[in-house]
Structures are given as structure tokens and as C-alpha cells.
Image (cartoon, rainbow, N blue to C red):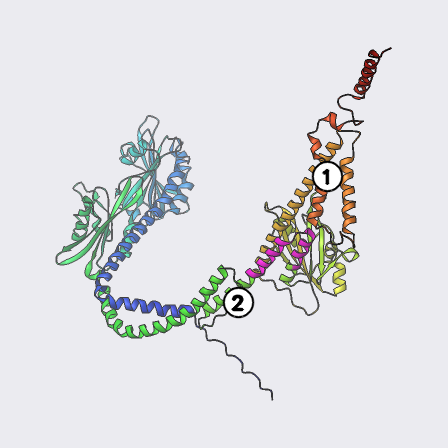
Amino acid sequence: MFVAGRQKKPNLELPLHLLGVIGVTTLLVIVAATFAWHTYRGTQDILLTTSAETTRYIRDTLNEKVQRILSPARNQITLLAHSGLSSADNLVQRLAELPLIFDALNENPITDALYVGYPNGEFVLFRPLRNDSVRRVVKAPKTATLMVQSMTQDAVGVMIGEYRYYDADRKLIDMRFQPDYRYDPRTRPWYQMASKQPGIIMTEPYVFFTTKLVGATLASRSADGAVIVALDLTLESIAAELKSIRITPSTELALVGRRGQVVAYRDSAKMTVLQSDGSLRLVTIDELKTPALAAASNLLTGTRIREQVELEGRKWQISTTKIEIQGTNSVTMLIAIPEDELFAGGRSIVKSQLMIALVILLVAILVGWLGTRLLVKPINRLARETKAIATFDFEKDVKVKTIISEVGDLGRSLSRMKVTIRKFLDIGHALSAEREFRALLDLVLRETIELVESDGGAIYLWHEDEGMLHPEIVRWHDDEMAGPDTHAKSLPLNGAGLPGEIGAALSNGRIALIERRLEQDELEALGLLELVEREQAIRMALIVVPLFNRKQQVLGTLLLTKAIGVGQKSWSVSNRLIELIRAVSGSAGVAIENKQLLQAQKDLMDALIKLIAGAIDAKSTYTGGHCARVPALTRMLAEATCARMHGPFADFNLSAEEWEAVEIGSWLHDCGKVTTPEFVVDKATKLETLYDRIHEIRMRFEVLNVSAGAISPH
């Protein structure tokens, strides 16, 4: 009786971060219980640190606010410095710049006035009239939006004051002559500072005479240096910013200038004081009558920037920090925070934490212990597997049982990594061990086809002399195609006439996957038309893998093909597989380059050997051709010996390396003649040296003959 096996239930997996939270919570609770008596002090330090951070934040916020104010103002100053106001000789020419002035004032709402001072004492000022209070101060018509104040010389050199008023449509609606209006810009601090210093200068904050607002003046010489252009900026927005960034309800903040005057405070009405001459000036920090800020100002004379003081039975944290404005100008921010408000939240937090910590402690210890056991066991297993990978041990697959989903994913990823590394190493070993070039190409093609599960493929190599990629080896369904079955054609390196994706891959060196339906002319250009018809495929999917050498020069390309028939799914090639193909193609490119370099080295050596032999043969016309005939005779003798099936040479055979050694030895057998004198090598007879010595032998016989006749008895 057949009993169906019980289906294995999947392992329960929980997110790792859940157990991580439990562990971290346990650690925090233990630390909180152990150091409970330090909690309040630590909370105070945290709050003080937070206060310091908040102070820096306020400083950065105000600094950013100031820079937002100054940035468009600097742009406007630069614009005015390059405008026609600097070269205008009369009021008519200066009023011609009104469109530019209107646009500049509309872009920056905190600009109180734009004005230009001339070396001869002339002056022109453009003041926006944004509200009724300003109109009342300058006695302007209700519809006026811009006021132009000017001081110009008449023909006899008398200064004439004039007020002009323009409406929102930029039309002149009123004009008034002011005989009693006297203003010499050359006596003003902004004019004198800008005349002496290059670039844009900024005055100390002060109360503007006309609008009674607190602000500062920016001034600069014009582009040609002839006049001084300036604008007034109000600081009301900074004072408004101070109202919204107090740390606690009773926190006091103020900005103080270099001479101790208050330039920004939450209550702007307290910032000015009326003088005996009827003008307004900025109050000093002492005149502000805020004891906490006055105590903070005392830090300016010392080296400390933070301190704790007690004022009227209340403790305060006071601090100072500088804010850079323009050039050497800077203001100091004074901050005073009451400690009872600062630490109120900390005291409440400490009390609640101490009550909860004791209850959570026992439960947290138990949960942390169980969680640690579940966490450590599979991680230790993965650690052992990682050590096995480090020692190139790929025999066993990674199997980790765990309820933690992240650890399970890690184990599966580690298993895939082992398979990938093993496969890559096997391919690398095979590529390095293969000696024959064609066998190497076949190995690369077969391994890559198996890797991507394609139906076939081809390797094209670059022939520089022809400027084409020629098919070196083609495979289809594990069979090498040759002869008439090979329809692969040579391809141009730029991919001309081919599918656009192939041309792009060959030109930019990237792997390309083509899954669309190829047109008939594209199939013909690739030599795949007959394969598509034979396989009855509706389309042919391609992977183009460029092959490069170490210098990233094109060696060739690897073309992988898969015939997709009716009802078949598209070719699924993941990014991981693409990366593996890229790694294999890189190793294959290096291996092919090594084989090509080795073959080139052998060809070079063979050419040098034959060059030496040819030089030896060329030394004598009588023995010429000897060095070329010996290798042929040697090969014939060696082949005859290897062909013997019987006798003492029946087991004699030569390997490829030995054949190469015989060839080199036979070509170099006479290389000693390179150093042999020419009169020894070049001899028509055996006795010939520098001259024919046969005459010496004849002379010896003649001497002997004469000597024999001289001693004859006759």
C-alpha cells in the first residue's frame, strides 16, 4: 500500500530587526537599571548639550537669515555699480534708470532705499513707499509707490533739492522742489568707507533718519570707480525671527553690535531711545533692562562663552556666540535660558523611567536570552561556511535552519555565492590549462553556452588587416558547425548593417541582450536566417558579449543565440547572470590574449631562427641552402621513425613540444657558422682559404724536384 509522504512544513522566519530591537531594548534597560542614579545628571547633560546644539542652530538660522538678506542686496549693489547711474551727468539721465530701480526694489522687500553719491556732492535716492506709514513720513501722495530724492547742481553750481513721486504704473504723479533740502553724501560714513575700501562695505547697524527703522547700509564704488552706490537694509525680519526661535517661554535672545548696541530684539519698541536732539539711537544692552542678557553680555569681556548664573532666586544658562555678517562686521548673539524651564521635561522623564525600568528588567532579560540563542546559532553556522569559502572548500552546500528571515536569506545567498565561485574557478582553471588555441575558443564557447542555457553561439575574432570580425568557431545544440552548415558571416566592428543593439555593444563595450523580433535583413547579416527557418522559431534572442584584452582593446565578440518558438517564454537573463558572463568573458579575453601573445612570441622566435639560418646560407654560394634543407630532412627522418610499428622504434613518438624542439634544433644546427670567418665558410674546394693553397703544394713538389736534381751524381 502506497502512503503519500507528509509534506514538510516551511520553517517559521521572523525579521532580524525584531529580535535586534528586543536585544537593544534589553541592553538599554539593563544599563538604565544599573546606572539609574546617574539618570538625572545625564539628562541634565543631555539637555545642556541640546541647549548648546539649539544655540548653534539658532546661530546658524540667524546667520542664514542674514545671508539671505545680504545676498540679493549684494547683487543689487553690483547691478547698480554697473548701471548707467555711475556715468549719468544730470538728473534726466539718472531717471532713465528708473525701470531698473523699480525691478530691483520689487525683488528685495527689505530694501529701505537705493541711492548714489557723486564726487561733486550730487545725490539721488530711490525710496519704495510700501505702506501708508512711510507715505505719511515723507508726505507722499496716496497712490505713490516710489519717491526719488535728488540733489543736483544748476548751471552756476547751486545745489537744487527735488522730490519726485511715481505710482505703481511707474508714471510721475507729483514733483516738488525743496530749497531747504541739504544733503552732502561725501560727509556720510558709508561714502567715506566705500571710497577707502575695495569691494562692498557694510556700516554698523543704526536707526534710519527718515523711516526710524533699524538697519544697516551697504555701499560700493561703481565699476568705473567714479561714484558710490549704496542701499539701506532693514533688520525687522531678524527681530521677527527671534520671536519664533526661543527655546523656552522665558528664553531671552538679543543681537548686540560691537559697541554694545542692541541691533535685534523680540520687542522692537525697546530697541531705540529718543535723544535730546529729537533723533533716535539704538539702546545698549544695559539700557534694555533685562538682567539675564546683561549678565550674558559680561561674558564678552572674558574667555568663557557659557556660564550658569543665579538672578533673583532663579538659575539661568547664559551663553554668547558670534555671527559674521559682512567682511569684518559681526554681531554677538546673547542667550539666557531659565534652568527650571529647561530641565522641567527631564525631571518628568527620569521619574517615569525609574518606575518602568524595574518592571521591564526581568522580562527583558528572559526575552533577550532566548533571542540571543536563536540569533547566534545560525550565525555561527554561517561563519563556519564563510571560513570554508576562505579556504576554497566548495564541497558542501550551505544549509542553515533558522526562524530569522534575514539569516535565511543570507544562507541562501551564501550557497549561491559558493556555486558561482566554484563555477567561475572551474572555468578559470580550464581556460588556463588549455594549450591549443582552437580548443580554448571551443571551451570558452561551450562553457558560456552552458552558463546561460542558450541554443548556440559563435566567437568572432578581430582581424586587423581586414578590419572585420571573423567567425572562428560556431556551435549549435552542442555540435560544432563547420563547412556548409556554418552560415555565420564576418561582422564590421562598428556594427554597420547589424541590429542597433549589436552595434552599440560593439562600440561601447557593454553586454547587450536583444529579445525583440529581428528583421529578415538583420538575420541575413548575422547568418541566422536559415537557422530560424530550420528551427521554426518566431524570433531569435541574442546576447552580445564583447571580448577585450588587458588594454581594453577589442579582441572579438561572443554571440549567444536562443531560438524562441511559439508558446515559449522570453529568455530570462538576470543581472547576476549578466555579471557572471562579464566576469567569464573578462577571463576568456585574457586567456585568448595570452594565447595570441604566446603564438606571436613563437612566430617571432621562428622568424628569428630562420633569419639566422638564412644569413648563414647567404655567406657562401657554395654551401647555400644547407640550413634550409636540413630541417626538411630531419622532419622526414623523424616522421619515418614515428611511423615505425615494429622494431626498436615501435614505441617511439614525439609530443607537440618535442616536435617543436626538433624543428628548432634542425634550423639551428649550423648556428656556429655565425662566428666562423667567411674565408672558412666560403670555399669552393677543401683546401681553399684566403687564396687557393693548391699552388703551395705544387711549389713544394717543384722544390723537392729541384733539390733532388741538385744532389744527383750526374
Q: Residue furthest right?
A: 714
Residue type at mark 1: give it: Trp
| Quadrant of residue 84 within the rendered picture | top left
Placement of the N terminus among the 4 image quadrants: bottom right
Magenta stretch, residue numbers: 421-446
C-alpha separation, residue under disc 2 versus residue under disc 1: 54 Å
Is residue 604 shown above or below 476? above
Q: Is residue 465 visible?
A: no
Of residue 212 and residue 203, the one placed in the foreground of this image is 203
Disc 1 packing (10 Å; few <14; some 14–19; many ≥20)? many
Is 480 or 165 nearer to us in this picture? 480
Q: Secondary structure at mark 2?
A: loop
Relative side of 98 to 420, left or right? left
Q: Secondary structure at mark 1?
A: helix
Q: Which residue is mark 2?
A: 396
Within 10 Å of disc 2 (Cα), the crowding (few <14, some 14-19, many 20+) is: few
Residue 96: where, in percent of width, then height?
42, 37
Question: On the rendered structure, is 489 left or right of 193?
Answer: right
Percent coordinates x, y for residue 236 in the rendering: 29, 49
Q: Give the residue at the far left of this rendering.
A: 312
Residue at image position (33%, 47%) is 110
**Going 34% across and 49% down the picture, which residue do you hit?**
64
